[in-house]
Amino acid sequence: MAQHAQFRLAAVQAAPAYFDREASTEKACRLIQEAGARGATLAAFSESWLPGYPFWVWGSATESMAVEYLANAVEIPSATTERLCEAARHAGIDVVIGVAERDAQTQGTVYCTLLFISSDGSILGRHRKLKPTHRERTAWGEGDGSSLTVYERPYARISGLNCWEHNMVLPGYVLMSQGTQVHIAAWPGMRTSRHLFLSRAFASQAGAYVIDVGASLAPDQVSDAYKDIARRYPGQTCIIDPKGEVIAGPAEGETILVADCSMEQIFAAKAECDVAGHYSRPDVFQLRVNRTPHRRVVDIQEQEYEAHESEADPEE
């Protein structure tokens, strides 16, 4: 009989120190250590956890709120990501955490980013949300196809998407086509049956475990400037098996939810239905993906030089 890899997934449901990068980073590092102490192989945080989901876009947002959000956003790499990487290395676990990522070049745009960190303390990669939803577009810019990546880890292949990217259908299929086995579905944490429905559907379609993770929020957890517009987010975090069944949660309040998982369950689900393999019809359907990173300014001389180099005979 084959020996199947075993691993433990952790969903970190907690409130950050809203819109305070330093305090949120300190709390994130502590929670990473706690997840490691509980034997987790991978710990996942919610959408834009550091320094918090910009819930103010759904209320009476002011210019000062946007300014504060931009000022507390996270650049990659930076001293903030170094602290997160060190926490992951010290705990010996992989970490996927939602951050409000500030554009290091323009210093004027924030992306809703999932940051993937290895247990050795290195950055595996990042995924920027492709299409912010409705009023989120006043807070976040758009990502591109270059970050639709599945990461090969010793225990499983991992991936992640933010919130309503799961409603877009196509980004998920790109990840399924790369054989994702553990997927992080990062949500703000508001109570809604839709996010659980979409997360369970993803698990069933992908034949993958899904960490459906949200943050918690209450008016007493934010500063006076935000109390009147702060919604109550209970989190509603859960962990879902590769056939779409909830195996841990849903949980409310601050907690670290864990579930023991097995590659055997992944193989069983994919053997039954592999949507990008034996359960596909490439003669009928094909998906095209543009993986070229956005380039808003192109140096013509550089472009001409690259074209010349590509045409040159390598033997000359």
Image (cartoon, rainbow, N blue to C red):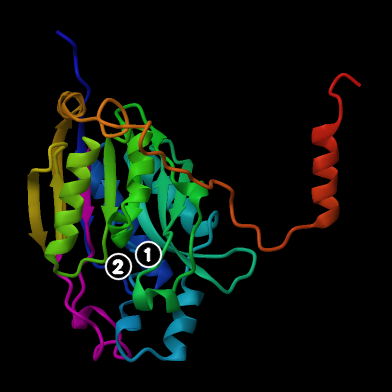
Find numbered disc 1 in the image and state the secondary structure of the residue it sits on.
Answer: loop
Above or below, comparing residue 183 to residue 77 in the picture: above
Range of magenta residues: 208-235
The front one of 239 and 73 is: 239
Q: Residue furthest right?
A: 316
Residues at discs 2 and 1 in contact (Cβ within 8 Å):
yes
For residue 188, side relative to residue 82 (left or right): left
Find numbered disc 2 in the image and state the secondary structure of the residue it sits on.
Answer: loop
The answer to whether any part of residue 92 appears in the image is no
Q: What is the three-letter code of the residue carrying label 1?
A: Leu
Residue 229: mark in rendering: none
Q: Residue at the spot x=15%, y=56% of the render?
A: 196
Q: Residue at the spot x=16%, y=36% of the render?
A: 242
Q: Is residue 210 magenta?
A: yes
Residue 16: mark in rendering: 2
Where is residue 224 shown, x and y percent of the image?
29, 90
Residue 139 falls in image quadrant: bottom left
Q: Quadrant of the N terminus?
A: top left
Q: Quadrant of the C terminus?
A: top right
Q: What is the three-letter code of the residue carrying label 2?
A: Pro
Q: Is residue 45 magenta?
A: no
Above or below, comparing residue 309 to residue 4 in the picture: below
Where is residue 157 shown, x and y percent of the image?
34, 33
Above or below, comparing residue 307 to residue 105 in the picture: above
The residue beneath circle 1 is: 50
